[in-house]
Image (tube, grey):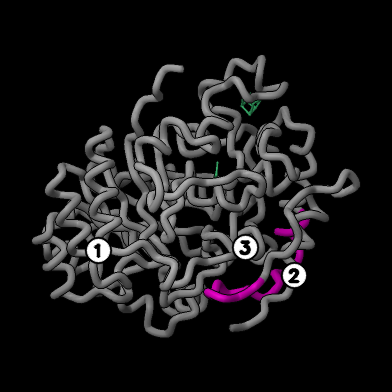
């Protein structure tokens, strides 16, 4: 067996703690508690291991990574070992002193999430009063510190009508890049899918808005546009292919091919507490399971797209069909594709149910995740969505 190429980037999910409670969060329903988190020393070792094996970038994420008091130490280590350090944050805990300290430690880029162009809608999504105002202040401070800024716009049925205003806000805040990212339905977002799913018309309008803005703001703002899988004809090359370009480490130290991989039951993920990052990347069973094309069933096996989209997303295939080795239902060649499209149309056409907000300790998901033969895509995801949340 030849060793795989090293990953390009490490997504370091250093905590699941977060002052916001966004219903579109893609974190797993079973969130790690503070007591489960890797300690500073282990993260420092792992960052050095990542650089040694050839990783180029580290994205500090969560949860809300600024919850961790040792973030400056981790950024400093990343810079020392030559990793490009990016911070993916909701911003609501940052102030000028902390941004200065992170910049001095070697932070090179900030990705700041925004939920709307106006306060009421934004604070409702994050379930945090004053969150929107704080983000605006933080965006200005990030630019004042001289750091390049990307704004992440997470789009859904409740804010798509404000997309143009959100783009204007990005220009006003002197952002370099905007990610117009429609919700991807994993974790909490899957449970809130009916509350978030846009209509096809909303999606088409958004695509036209992005295209016009891209043209109008050439040289000012760069756009990435991620469309929701449920309306796509072909799946996205999720993570650039399982175990190919990205490696993810969960707050408790599990090494994962993507942020949602723990939702796939029956796969055992090794931990950096026990093994080196390189060893896990190269030889752990979970990384081997869906790496490359050898695992693919038909229609992927003989499809000319198989080394372009790598069969789509394993987590989505598992969530919607009960078998992670199935073709992603976002693909038009999947036997489940028509069902998925119909589901998106039905959910987006009905009145939205209330949000189920993300909370640590909310026991929500029972069962083994296996799909029974008589289950449809709708009954499986719908049952999950209706499961009540036990408040902590
Ligand atoms: Fe991609 Fe498989 Fe669909 Fe071909 S059949 S487009 S490889 S998901
Ligand atoms: Fe896990 Fe796509 S999110 S493979």
Residue 146 on image: x %, y %: 11, 58
Instruction: Kindly report the distance in space between the C-alpha atoms of the residues bearing marks 2 and 3.
Output: 17 Å
341 or 20, which lies in front?
Answer: 20
Within 10 Å of the Cα at label 2, are there few (<14), some (14-19), or many (20+) other Cα atoms?
Answer: some
Give the residue number, with chain letter if any, for mark 1: 173
Q: Is residue 382 above or below residue 359?
A: above
- Using residue 376 as the reference point, say whether residue 231 is left or right of it: left
Give the residue number, with chain letter if any, for mark 3: 196
Dot 2 or dot 3: first in sequence order is 3
382 or 252, which lies in front?
Answer: 252
The question of residue 351 being in magenta is answered with: yes
Residue 114 on image: x %, y %: 39, 65
Residue 1 on image: x %, y %: 46, 17
Dot 1 or dot 2: first in sequence order is 1
- Using residue 234 as the reference point, say whether residue 212 is left or right of it: left
Question: What SS does tag 1 mark?
Answer: loop
Q: Which residues are magenta?
A: 346-363
Dot 3 or dot 1: first in sequence order is 1
Give the residue number, with chain letter if any, for mark 2: 387
Q: Main secondary structure of the magenta part?
A: loop
Image point (68%, 44%), residue name = 318
Labelled pair 2, 3 in contact (Cβ < 8 Å):
no
């Amino acid at each position: 067996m030849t060793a795989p190429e090293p990953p390009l980037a490490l997504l370091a999910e250093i905590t699941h703690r977060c002052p916001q409670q966004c219903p579109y969060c893609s974190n797993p329903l079973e969130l790690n508690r503070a007591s489960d988190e890797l300690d500073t020393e282990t993260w420092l070792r792992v960052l050095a291991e990542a650089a040694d094996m050839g990783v180029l970038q580290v994205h500090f994420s969560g949860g809300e990574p600024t919850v961790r008091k040792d973030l400056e130490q981790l950024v400093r280590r990343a810079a020392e070992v030559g990793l490009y350090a990016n911070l993916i944050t909701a911003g609501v805990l940052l102030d000028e002193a902390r941004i200065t300290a992170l910049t001095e430690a070697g932070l090179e880029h900030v990705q700041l999430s925004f939920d709307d162009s106006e306060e009421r809608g934004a604070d409702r999504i994050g379930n945090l009063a004053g969150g929107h105002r704080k983000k605006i202040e933080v965006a200005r401070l990030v630019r004042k510190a001289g750091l390049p800024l990307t704004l992440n716009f997470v789009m859904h049925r409740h804010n798509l009508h404000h997309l143009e205003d959100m783009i204007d806000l990005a220009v006003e805040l002197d952002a370099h890049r905007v990610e117009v990212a429609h919700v991807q339905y994993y974790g909490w977002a899957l449970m809130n899918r009916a509350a978030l799913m846009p209509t096809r018309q909303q999606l088409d309008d958004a695509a036209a808005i992005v295209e016009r803005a891209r043209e109008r703001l050439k040289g000012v703002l760069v756009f990435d546009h991620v469309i929701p899988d449920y309306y796509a004809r072909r799946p996205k090359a999720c993570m650039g292919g399982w175990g190919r370009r990205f490696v993810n480490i969960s707050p408790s130290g599990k090494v994962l091919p993507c942020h949602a991989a723990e939702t796939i039951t029956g796969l055992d993920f090794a931990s950096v507490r026990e093994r080196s990052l390189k060893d896990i990347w190269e030889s752990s069973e979970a990384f081997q399971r869906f790496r490359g094309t050898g695992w693919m069933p038909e229609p992927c096996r003989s499809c000319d797209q198989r080394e372009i989209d790598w069969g789509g997303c394993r987590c989505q295939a598992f969530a919607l069909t009960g078998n992670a080795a199935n073709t992603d239902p976002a693909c038009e060649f999947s036997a489940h594709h028509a069902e998925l499209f119909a589901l998106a149309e039905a959910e987006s056409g009905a009145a939205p149910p209330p949000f189920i907000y993300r909370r640590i300790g909310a026991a929500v998901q029972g069962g083994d995740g296996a799909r029974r033969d008589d289950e449809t895509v709708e009954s499986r995801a719908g049952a999950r969505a209706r499961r009540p949340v036990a408040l902590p």
